[in-house]
Image (spheres, rainbow, N blue to C red):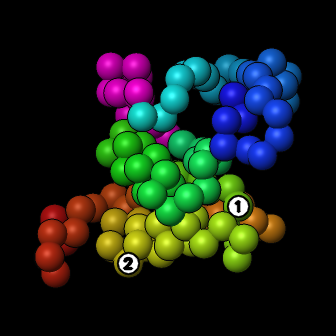
Amino acid sequence: MNDAMPDARQDNYCQFIENTKAFADMITPIRKRSESLSRSDLDGELDLAFIDGDHDEEAVRSDFGRVSELIKPGGVVAFHDLNSYHPGVGIVVGEALASGNWRLAGYVDSLAWIRKTKWRQIGSVLE
């Protein structure tokens, strides 16, 4: 649903399925609000999560906090609308990069993606 958009409420699921049908064998859609997502919804860890919901800093931080724990080492979280119009997205991405647990993997237009490092940083020690 496009609940965070200023447009009239609209169900975009069929459009998503149509737009991604070439990759249907690689995508497992989980249709629910991010705050309801749990590990039991998944068969294992995620390779990729795409965050493009409410662009408010608190909402982006909540979405990232929820999916970051579900991403396997080497996996990616992509963020849409990393730009000056949506500063919350940039703040959360910056915090993730500053943690040392994520590395910038790519950026094009307003889409950025970060890769989870294959190690965990505890203080100044890599484990």
Res. 2 visible in picture: yes
| Rendered location of residue 85, percent (x, y) | 72, 71
Camera-side residue: 104 or 119?
A: 104
> Relative to the observer, which residue lies in front, 30 or 100?
30
Categorize mark 2 by other alpha carbons within 10 Å: few (<14), some (14-19), many (20+): few
**27 part of magenta stretch:** no
Please state the horizontal and vertical placement of residue 106, each as a whole percent of the image.
Answer: 65, 67
Specify start and end residues of the magenta stretch as a single range: 36-47
Q: Is 37 one of the magenta-colored residues?
A: yes
Q: Secondary structure at mark 1?
A: loop
- Is residue 88 toward the left or the right of residue 7 in the image? left
> Circle 2 is placed at which residue position?
98
Question: Which residue is painted at 47% across and 66% down in the image?
Answer: 92
Q: Can you tell which quarter of the image residue 105 is in?
A: bottom right
| 22 over 107 or under it: above or below | above
Residue at x 42%, y 43% (from the top left corner): 67
In this view, the residue in front, 119 or 85, is 85
Mark 1 crowdedness (10 Å alpha carbons): few <14, some 14-19, many ≥20: some
SS for callout 2: helix
Residue in the picture at 35% in, 27% down: 38
| For discs 2 and 1, the disc positioned in front in the rendered view | 1
Q: Indicate the amino acid at tag 1.
A: Asp
Residue picked out by circle 1: 81
